[in-house]
Image (cartoon, rainbow, N blue to C red):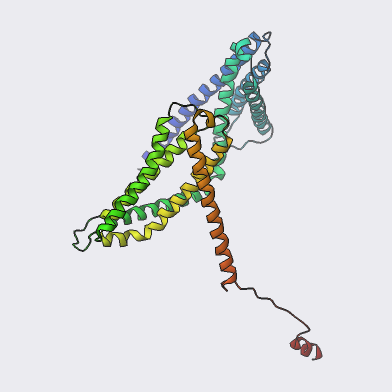
Amino acid sequence: MAEADTEQLVVDNKKSSVGSSFGLIFALIFCFGFGVALAYAAGANWNKECDQPLKAFLAGFGGTGIFAALVFLVLELTSKGDEEDLSGVSAVAFYFVLVLFFVFGIAGASVYWASEDCEIVAAVAHRWTFAGVLAFLILAFLISSSLFGKFGGPVFAVFGMGFANLFQFLANMFKGLSDALTDDGDPANKPAKRSAGGDFSLYVNHAILMWFFGYILMQVHTERDEPCDVPLKKCLLAFGIYGVLMAYFDFLFEKFAGVKTREKLSPYFRYVWAINVLAYIIWGIYTAVEVFSSSSCEKTAKNTYRLSFLLSCVFFVFGGFMGLGLCAGVLDFLCSGRLRFVVVVETGPNEEDEEFKAS
Protein backbone atom coordinates (compact mmCIF):
# COMPACT_ATOMS: atom_id res chain seq x y z
CA MET A 1 0.00 0.00 0.00
CA ALA A 2 2.84 2.37 0.88
CA GLU A 3 4.64 1.54 -2.37
CA ALA A 4 1.47 2.30 -4.36
CA ASP A 5 1.09 5.66 -2.61
CA THR A 6 4.73 6.49 -3.33
CA GLU A 7 4.34 5.59 -7.00
CA GLN A 8 1.20 7.71 -7.26
CA LEU A 9 3.00 10.66 -5.62
CA VAL A 10 5.87 10.34 -8.12
CA VAL A 11 3.40 10.29 -11.02
CA ASP A 12 1.60 13.38 -9.67
CA ASN A 13 4.92 15.20 -9.25
CA LYS A 14 5.86 14.37 -12.85
CA LYS A 15 2.51 15.67 -14.11
CA SER A 16 2.92 18.87 -12.07
CA SER A 17 6.46 19.31 -13.38
CA VAL A 18 5.34 18.82 -17.00
CA GLY A 19 2.47 21.31 -16.54
CA SER A 20 4.80 23.83 -14.96
CA SER A 21 7.29 23.41 -17.81
CA PHE A 22 4.63 24.05 -20.46
CA GLY A 23 3.45 27.11 -18.52
CA LEU A 24 6.99 28.45 -18.25
CA ILE A 25 7.70 27.88 -21.95
CA PHE A 26 4.50 29.69 -22.95
CA ALA A 27 5.27 32.60 -20.60
CA LEU A 28 8.83 32.96 -21.92
CA ILE A 29 7.74 32.81 -25.56
CA PHE A 30 4.96 35.34 -25.00
CA CYS A 31 7.16 37.71 -23.01
CA PHE A 32 9.95 37.53 -25.59
CA GLY A 33 7.56 37.89 -28.53
CA PHE A 34 5.66 40.76 -26.96
CA GLY A 35 8.93 42.55 -26.24
CA VAL A 36 10.11 42.07 -29.81
CA ALA A 37 6.78 43.38 -31.13
CA LEU A 38 7.01 46.52 -28.99
CA ALA A 39 10.62 47.12 -30.00
CA TYR A 40 9.74 46.63 -33.68
CA ALA A 41 6.81 49.08 -33.35
CA ALA A 42 9.20 51.60 -31.84
CA GLY A 43 11.69 51.21 -34.69
CA ALA A 44 9.05 51.28 -37.43
CA ASN A 45 7.53 54.50 -36.05
CA TRP A 46 10.74 56.18 -34.91
CA ASN A 47 10.41 59.02 -37.43
CA LYS A 48 6.79 59.80 -36.54
CA GLU A 49 6.89 62.59 -33.99
CA CYS A 50 4.06 63.48 -31.62
CA ASP A 51 3.69 65.41 -28.38
CA GLN A 52 4.80 62.46 -26.19
CA PRO A 53 7.83 60.11 -26.49
CA LEU A 54 5.84 56.94 -27.10
CA LYS A 55 8.63 55.38 -29.14
CA ALA A 56 11.02 55.64 -26.17
CA PHE A 57 8.53 53.78 -24.00
CA LEU A 58 8.00 51.11 -26.65
CA ALA A 59 11.73 50.57 -27.01
CA GLY A 60 12.37 50.52 -23.24
CA PHE A 61 9.40 48.36 -22.29
CA GLY A 62 9.99 46.01 -25.22
CA GLY A 63 13.64 45.66 -24.26
CA THR A 64 12.57 44.96 -20.68
CA GLY A 65 10.30 42.16 -21.90
CA ILE A 66 13.10 40.57 -23.94
CA PHE A 67 15.57 40.94 -21.08
CA ALA A 68 13.06 39.49 -18.58
CA ALA A 69 12.46 36.43 -20.78
CA LEU A 70 16.21 35.76 -21.01
CA VAL A 71 16.76 36.32 -17.27
CA PHE A 72 13.99 33.95 -16.20
CA LEU A 73 15.13 31.37 -18.75
CA VAL A 74 18.61 31.40 -17.22
CA LEU A 75 17.16 31.32 -13.68
CA GLU A 76 15.08 28.28 -14.57
CA LEU A 77 17.99 26.46 -16.21
CA THR A 78 20.29 27.10 -13.23
CA SER A 79 17.61 26.40 -10.60
CA LYS A 80 18.11 23.38 -8.34
CA GLY A 81 14.59 23.17 -6.95
CA ASP A 82 11.18 24.79 -6.93
CA GLU A 83 11.64 26.34 -3.49
CA GLU A 84 15.17 27.67 -3.96
CA ASP A 85 15.64 31.24 -2.68
CA LEU A 86 17.24 33.79 -4.96
CA SER A 87 20.67 35.00 -3.93
CA GLY A 88 23.73 36.64 -5.41
CA VAL A 89 23.62 37.40 -9.12
CA SER A 90 20.21 35.76 -9.51
CA ALA A 91 18.64 38.09 -6.94
CA VAL A 92 20.29 41.14 -8.52
CA ALA A 93 19.01 40.18 -11.98
CA PHE A 94 15.49 39.49 -10.66
CA TYR A 95 15.14 42.81 -8.86
CA PHE A 96 16.76 44.67 -11.76
CA VAL A 97 14.06 43.32 -14.08
CA LEU A 98 11.42 44.34 -11.54
CA VAL A 99 12.80 47.89 -11.33
CA LEU A 100 12.93 48.23 -15.11
CA PHE A 101 9.37 46.93 -15.37
CA PHE A 102 7.96 49.52 -12.96
CA VAL A 103 10.08 52.42 -14.23
CA PHE A 104 9.16 51.95 -17.90
CA GLY A 105 5.59 50.94 -17.02
CA ILE A 106 4.85 54.04 -14.94
CA ALA A 107 6.56 56.26 -17.49
CA GLY A 108 4.57 54.68 -20.32
CA ALA A 109 1.26 55.10 -18.51
CA SER A 110 2.10 58.75 -17.84
CA VAL A 111 2.98 59.61 -21.44
CA TYR A 112 0.02 57.62 -22.80
CA TRP A 113 -2.58 59.53 -20.77
CA ALA A 114 -0.81 62.85 -21.31
CA SER A 115 -0.84 62.41 -25.10
CA GLU A 116 -3.06 64.72 -27.14
CA ASP A 117 -2.19 64.21 -30.81
CA CYS A 118 -0.32 60.87 -30.84
CA GLU A 119 -3.50 58.97 -31.61
CA ILE A 120 -3.68 60.84 -34.94
CA VAL A 121 -0.05 61.57 -35.78
CA ALA A 122 1.39 58.20 -34.67
CA ALA A 123 -1.60 55.88 -34.56
CA VAL A 124 0.35 52.60 -34.67
CA ALA A 125 2.69 53.64 -31.86
CA HIS A 126 -0.28 54.86 -29.86
CA ARG A 127 -2.08 51.50 -30.15
CA TRP A 128 1.03 49.54 -29.20
CA THR A 129 1.60 51.87 -26.27
CA PHE A 130 -1.92 51.12 -25.09
CA ALA A 131 -1.17 47.39 -25.33
CA GLY A 132 2.02 47.81 -23.30
CA VAL A 133 0.37 50.00 -20.65
CA LEU A 134 -2.50 47.54 -20.32
CA ALA A 135 -0.05 44.66 -19.81
CA PHE A 136 1.82 46.73 -17.21
CA LEU A 137 -1.35 47.55 -15.27
CA ILE A 138 -2.48 43.91 -15.19
CA LEU A 139 0.90 42.63 -14.05
CA ALA A 140 1.23 45.41 -11.47
CA PHE A 141 -2.21 44.50 -10.14
CA LEU A 142 -1.22 40.84 -9.82
CA ILE A 143 2.03 41.76 -8.06
CA SER A 144 0.19 44.00 -5.60
CA SER A 145 -2.32 41.20 -5.05
CA SER A 146 0.50 38.94 -3.91
CA LEU A 147 1.42 41.57 -1.31
CA PHE A 148 -2.19 41.66 -0.14
CA GLY A 149 -2.09 37.91 0.15
CA LYS A 150 0.87 38.10 2.50
CA PHE A 151 0.02 41.14 4.61
CA GLY A 152 -3.67 41.75 4.01
CA GLY A 153 -5.03 38.68 5.79
CA PRO A 154 -5.51 40.33 9.21
CA VAL A 155 -7.04 43.40 7.57
CA PHE A 156 -9.53 41.31 5.60
CA ALA A 157 -10.25 39.34 8.78
CA VAL A 158 -11.25 42.57 10.54
CA PHE A 159 -13.53 43.53 7.63
CA GLY A 160 -14.95 40.02 7.59
CA MET A 161 -15.76 40.17 11.28
CA GLY A 162 -17.35 43.60 10.84
CA PHE A 163 -19.53 42.40 7.98
CA ALA A 164 -20.43 39.26 9.92
CA ASN A 165 -21.63 41.37 12.87
CA LEU A 166 -23.49 43.72 10.55
CA PHE A 167 -25.31 40.94 8.73
CA GLN A 168 -26.07 39.21 12.02
CA PHE A 169 -27.60 42.45 13.30
CA LEU A 170 -29.64 42.84 10.11
CA ALA A 171 -30.75 39.21 10.27
CA ASN A 172 -31.92 39.62 13.87
CA MET A 173 -33.66 42.88 13.04
CA PHE A 174 -35.55 41.51 10.04
CA LYS A 175 -36.38 38.35 11.98
CA GLY A 176 -37.91 40.52 14.68
CA LEU A 177 -39.83 42.51 12.08
CA SER A 178 -41.10 39.32 10.51
CA ASP A 179 -42.28 38.01 13.88
CA ALA A 180 -43.92 41.34 14.70
CA LEU A 181 -45.76 41.57 11.39
CA THR A 182 -46.89 37.95 11.35
CA ASP A 183 -50.57 37.63 12.19
CA ASP A 184 -50.84 34.99 14.89
CA GLY A 185 -54.66 35.10 14.91
CA ASP A 186 -54.84 36.70 18.36
CA PRO A 187 -58.29 38.37 18.62
CA ALA A 188 -56.82 40.98 20.98
CA ASN A 189 -54.36 42.14 18.33
CA LYS A 190 -56.71 44.61 16.73
CA PRO A 191 -56.11 48.21 15.61
CA ALA A 192 -56.96 50.85 18.19
CA LYS A 193 -60.46 52.22 17.84
CA ARG A 194 -60.75 55.85 16.77
CA SER A 195 -63.52 58.35 16.92
CA ALA A 196 -64.93 60.00 13.83
CA GLY A 197 -62.62 62.95 14.43
CA GLY A 198 -59.63 60.63 14.80
CA ASP A 199 -60.33 58.96 11.47
CA PHE A 200 -60.87 62.35 9.88
CA SER A 201 -57.50 63.65 11.10
CA LEU A 202 -55.76 60.40 10.07
CA TYR A 203 -56.94 60.65 6.48
CA VAL A 204 -56.55 64.40 6.12
CA ASN A 205 -53.08 64.66 7.68
CA HIS A 206 -51.66 61.87 5.55
CA ALA A 207 -53.39 63.30 2.49
CA ILE A 208 -51.65 66.63 3.16
CA LEU A 209 -48.27 64.94 3.41
CA MET A 210 -48.79 62.90 0.26
CA TRP A 211 -50.12 66.00 -1.56
CA PHE A 212 -46.98 67.94 -0.58
CA PHE A 213 -44.59 65.30 -1.91
CA GLY A 214 -46.83 64.60 -4.90
CA TYR A 215 -46.76 68.30 -5.78
CA ILE A 216 -42.96 68.13 -5.86
CA LEU A 217 -43.11 65.15 -8.21
CA MET A 218 -45.58 66.94 -10.49
CA GLN A 219 -43.30 69.98 -10.71
CA VAL A 220 -40.41 67.76 -11.71
CA HIS A 221 -42.59 66.05 -14.31
CA THR A 222 -43.78 69.38 -15.70
CA GLU A 223 -40.23 70.66 -16.27
CA ARG A 224 -38.71 67.30 -17.20
CA ASP A 225 -37.59 68.63 -20.62
CA GLU A 226 -36.21 71.93 -19.35
CA PRO A 227 -32.39 72.08 -19.17
CA CYS A 228 -30.67 72.52 -15.81
CA ASP A 229 -26.91 72.65 -15.23
CA VAL A 230 -27.14 70.80 -11.89
CA PRO A 231 -29.14 67.65 -11.02
CA LEU A 232 -31.86 69.40 -9.02
CA LYS A 233 -34.58 67.37 -10.72
CA LYS A 234 -33.05 64.13 -9.45
CA CYS A 235 -32.84 65.60 -5.95
CA LEU A 236 -36.51 66.58 -5.99
CA LEU A 237 -37.49 63.24 -7.55
CA ALA A 238 -35.73 61.28 -4.80
CA PHE A 239 -37.20 63.52 -2.08
CA GLY A 240 -40.73 63.25 -3.47
CA ILE A 241 -40.72 59.47 -3.97
CA TYR A 242 -39.23 58.81 -0.54
CA GLY A 243 -41.70 61.18 1.12
CA VAL A 244 -44.74 59.65 -0.59
CA LEU A 245 -43.69 56.12 0.36
CA MET A 246 -42.97 57.01 3.99
CA ALA A 247 -46.28 58.87 4.34
CA TYR A 248 -48.22 55.96 2.85
CA PHE A 249 -46.47 53.36 5.02
CA ASP A 250 -47.18 55.45 8.09
CA PHE A 251 -50.85 55.60 7.09
CA LEU A 252 -50.99 51.83 6.75
CA PHE A 253 -49.34 51.39 10.13
CA GLU A 254 -51.67 53.81 11.92
CA LYS A 255 -54.74 52.37 10.25
CA PHE A 256 -54.19 48.62 10.39
CA ALA A 257 -51.45 47.80 12.94
CA GLY A 258 -52.82 45.98 15.98
CA VAL A 259 -52.03 46.83 19.58
CA LYS A 260 -49.61 43.95 20.08
CA THR A 261 -48.01 44.57 16.69
CA ARG A 262 -47.29 48.14 17.75
CA GLU A 263 -45.66 46.92 20.94
CA LYS A 264 -43.46 44.50 19.02
CA LEU A 265 -42.44 47.16 16.50
CA SER A 266 -41.80 49.93 19.02
CA PRO A 267 -38.08 48.98 19.56
CA TYR A 268 -37.44 49.56 15.85
CA PHE A 269 -38.87 53.07 15.73
CA ARG A 270 -35.58 54.65 16.82
CA TYR A 271 -33.81 53.03 13.88
CA VAL A 272 -36.43 54.35 11.48
CA TRP A 273 -36.07 57.85 12.91
CA ALA A 274 -32.28 57.67 12.76
CA ILE A 275 -32.31 56.51 9.13
CA ASN A 276 -34.80 59.22 8.13
CA VAL A 277 -32.84 62.00 9.85
CA LEU A 278 -29.54 60.81 8.40
CA ALA A 279 -31.02 60.50 4.90
CA TYR A 280 -32.55 64.00 5.19
CA ILE A 281 -29.25 65.53 6.32
CA ILE A 282 -27.35 63.94 3.44
CA TRP A 283 -30.03 64.96 0.95
CA GLY A 284 -30.24 68.49 2.33
CA ILE A 285 -26.49 69.11 2.20
CA TYR A 286 -26.20 67.74 -1.34
CA THR A 287 -29.22 69.69 -2.60
CA ALA A 288 -28.07 72.94 -0.98
CA VAL A 289 -24.63 72.59 -2.57
CA GLU A 290 -26.19 71.99 -5.98
CA VAL A 291 -28.61 74.92 -5.59
CA PHE A 292 -25.93 77.46 -4.75
CA SER A 293 -23.54 76.14 -7.40
CA SER A 294 -26.11 76.48 -10.20
CA SER A 295 -25.56 79.22 -12.75
CA SER A 296 -28.33 78.75 -15.31
CA CYS A 297 -31.02 76.56 -13.74
CA GLU A 298 -32.71 79.61 -12.21
CA LYS A 299 -33.48 80.85 -15.73
CA THR A 300 -34.07 77.60 -17.61
CA ALA A 301 -36.05 75.59 -15.02
CA LYS A 302 -37.50 78.26 -12.76
CA ASN A 303 -39.98 76.17 -10.76
CA THR A 304 -37.46 73.40 -10.14
CA TYR A 305 -34.88 75.91 -8.91
CA ARG A 306 -37.33 77.82 -6.72
CA LEU A 307 -38.66 74.67 -5.12
CA SER A 308 -35.13 73.37 -4.50
CA PHE A 309 -34.11 76.72 -3.02
CA LEU A 310 -37.17 76.73 -0.73
CA LEU A 311 -36.46 73.20 0.49
CA SER A 312 -32.81 74.14 1.07
CA CYS A 313 -33.93 77.07 3.24
CA VAL A 314 -36.19 74.72 5.20
CA PHE A 315 -33.22 72.40 5.65
CA PHE A 316 -31.12 75.27 7.02
CA VAL A 317 -33.88 76.09 9.52
CA PHE A 318 -34.04 72.42 10.50
CA GLY A 319 -30.27 72.35 10.90
CA GLY A 320 -30.38 75.48 13.04
CA PHE A 321 -32.95 73.95 15.38
CA MET A 322 -30.87 70.78 15.58
CA GLY A 323 -27.81 72.83 16.47
CA LEU A 324 -29.73 74.71 19.16
CA GLY A 325 -31.06 71.46 20.56
CA LEU A 326 -27.56 69.98 20.63
CA CYS A 327 -26.16 73.04 22.42
CA ALA A 328 -29.05 72.95 24.92
CA GLY A 329 -28.39 69.28 25.58
CA VAL A 330 -24.69 69.90 26.17
CA LEU A 331 -25.42 72.81 28.52
CA ASP A 332 -27.97 70.73 30.40
CA PHE A 333 -25.41 67.95 30.75
CA LEU A 334 -22.78 70.33 32.06
CA CYS A 335 -25.05 72.28 34.42
CA SER A 336 -27.29 69.55 35.80
CA GLY A 337 -24.65 67.86 37.93
CA ARG A 338 -24.15 64.84 35.65
CA LEU A 339 -20.62 66.05 34.95
CA ARG A 340 -18.58 66.90 38.00
CA PHE A 341 -15.18 68.53 38.26
CA VAL A 342 -13.00 67.59 41.19
CA VAL A 343 -10.39 70.18 42.14
CA VAL A 344 -7.67 69.20 44.58
CA VAL A 345 -5.90 72.12 46.30
CA GLU A 346 -2.78 71.40 48.32
CA THR A 347 -1.80 74.27 50.67
CA GLY A 348 1.10 72.77 52.56
CA PRO A 349 3.10 69.63 53.31
CA ASN A 350 1.22 66.59 54.38
CA GLU A 351 1.35 65.73 58.11
CA GLU A 352 2.26 62.13 57.37
CA ASP A 353 5.24 63.29 55.31
CA GLU A 354 6.45 65.49 58.19
CA GLU A 355 6.15 62.61 60.68
CA PHE A 356 8.06 60.34 58.30
CA LYS A 357 10.88 62.88 57.92
CA ALA A 358 11.02 63.42 61.74
CA SER A 359 11.38 59.69 62.34
Does residue 84 sit above or below 194 in this rendering?
above
Question: Residue drawn 50% across and 35% down?
Answer: 305
Location of residue 88 by image quarter: top right
Q: Nearer the viewer, residue 249 or 110?
A: 249
Location of residue 90 by image quarter: top right
The location of residue 55, given as percent across then percent down, is 66, 15
The location of residue 319, given as percent across then percent down, is 53, 51
Does residue 60 sit above or below 322 in this rendering?
above
Question: Residue drawn 57% across and 38% down?
Answer: 292
Question: Residue drawn 53% across and 60% down?
Answer: 325
Location of residue 137 by image quarter: top right
Question: Residue drawn 43% across and 50% down?
Answer: 276
Quadrant where the N terminus lies?
A: top left
Quadrant where the C terminus lies?
A: bottom right
Q: Nearer the viewer, residue 48 or 169?
A: 169
* Left or right of residue 359, residue 126 in this image: left
* Left or right of residue 83, residue 245 in this image: left
Does residue 28 sit above or below 256 in this rendering?
above
The location of residue 145, given as percent across then percent down, is 54, 37
Does residue 284 sit above or below 304 in this rendering?
below
The location of residue 135, given as percent across then percent down, is 56, 24
Q: Nearer the viewer, residue 185 or 76?
A: 185
Q: How many marks?
A: 0
Q: Residue furthest right?
A: 358
Q: Nearer the viewer, residue 359 or 197?
A: 197
* Left or right of residue 354, residue 142 in this image: left
Residue 6 visible? The answer is no
Residue 51 visible? The answer is yes
